[in-house]
């Protein structure tokens, strides 16, 4: 990398790639008055699209249960196309795993809340997420899974 090549990180497009809402026990579930137990799952995935162009998809899954009954299930895949150039190869993965999901999360949070409200339920307000901590936790887990003496392949 020469001195004139500055790192480039730009957002090309942010979009909802996939949305799903299921209310398997409607309409009876609307007669229930107790508070549901809410579970939230996150998954992030990155794919190269070409020279310095990447798609990152942050999938948020929210399941609300009343005992054994599912009140609702929402899955929102919020995606973005990002341009990343003049960045050392070893720094691209953290950008894709930390910076991009940080940008996408507020959009996913709004999409989930809006979809749940439109379905007739109280909005689900997702708490902020520390994607850097999740990334570091995943790296530690991968290192722990390696056998002693095993050499990682780059």
Image (tube, rainbow, N blue to C red):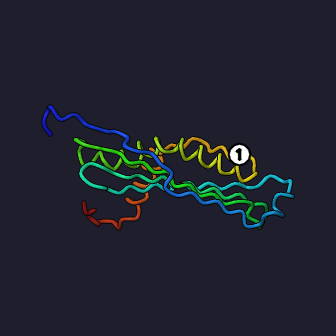
Residue most toward the top?
Answer: 4
Disc 1, SS: loop
**Above/below status of 13 relative to 18:** above
Residue 143: image quadrant is bottom left
Q: Nearer the viewer, residue 140 or 87?
A: 87
**Above/below status of 105 relative to 77:** above
Question: Which residue is found at the position 31% from the left and 56% from the top?
Answer: 48
Which residue is disc 1 drawn over?
123
Question: Which residue is found at the position 24% from the left and 60% from the top?
Answer: 154
104 relative to 5 in the view: left or right: right
Residue 153: image quadrant is bottom left
Image location of residue 60, percent across then percent down: 56, 54
Image location of residue 87, percent across then percent down: 25, 42
Image location of residue 27, percent across then percent down: 81, 63
Residue most toward the left?
Answer: 2
Q: Around disc 1, counting alpha carbons within 10 Å, would you say few (fewer than 14), some (14 to 19), or many (20 or more)?
A: some
Residue 50: image quadrant is bottom left
Tell me the quarter of the image containing the N terminus.
top left
Q: Nearer the viewer, residue 89 or 79?
A: 79
Q: Nearer the viewer, residue 149 or 94?
A: 94
52 relative to 128 in the view: left or right: left
Q: Give the tally of numbered discs.
A: 1
Image location of residue 30, percent across then percent down: 82, 57
Question: Which residue is found at the position 42% from the left and 56% from the top?
Answer: 45
């Amino acid at each position: 990398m020469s001195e004139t090549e500055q790192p480039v990180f730009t957002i090309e497009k942010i979009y909802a790639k996939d949305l799903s809402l299921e209310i398997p026990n409607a309409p009876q579930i609307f007669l229930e008055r107790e508070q549901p137990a809410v579970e939230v799952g996150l998954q992030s995935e990155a794919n190269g699209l070409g020279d310095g162009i990447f798609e990152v998809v942050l999938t948020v899954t929210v399941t609300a249960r009343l005992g054994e009954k599912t009140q609702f299930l929402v899955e929102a895949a919020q995606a973005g196309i990002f341009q990343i150039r003049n960045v050392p190869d070893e720094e691209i993965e953290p950008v894709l795993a930390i910076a991009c999901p940080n940008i996408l999360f507020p959009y996913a949070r709004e999409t989930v809340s809006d979809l749940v409200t439109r379905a007739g339920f109280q909005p689900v307000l997702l708490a902020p997420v520390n994607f850097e901590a999740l990334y570091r936790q995943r790296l530690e887990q991968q290192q722990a899974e390696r056998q002693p003496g095993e050499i990682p392949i780059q």
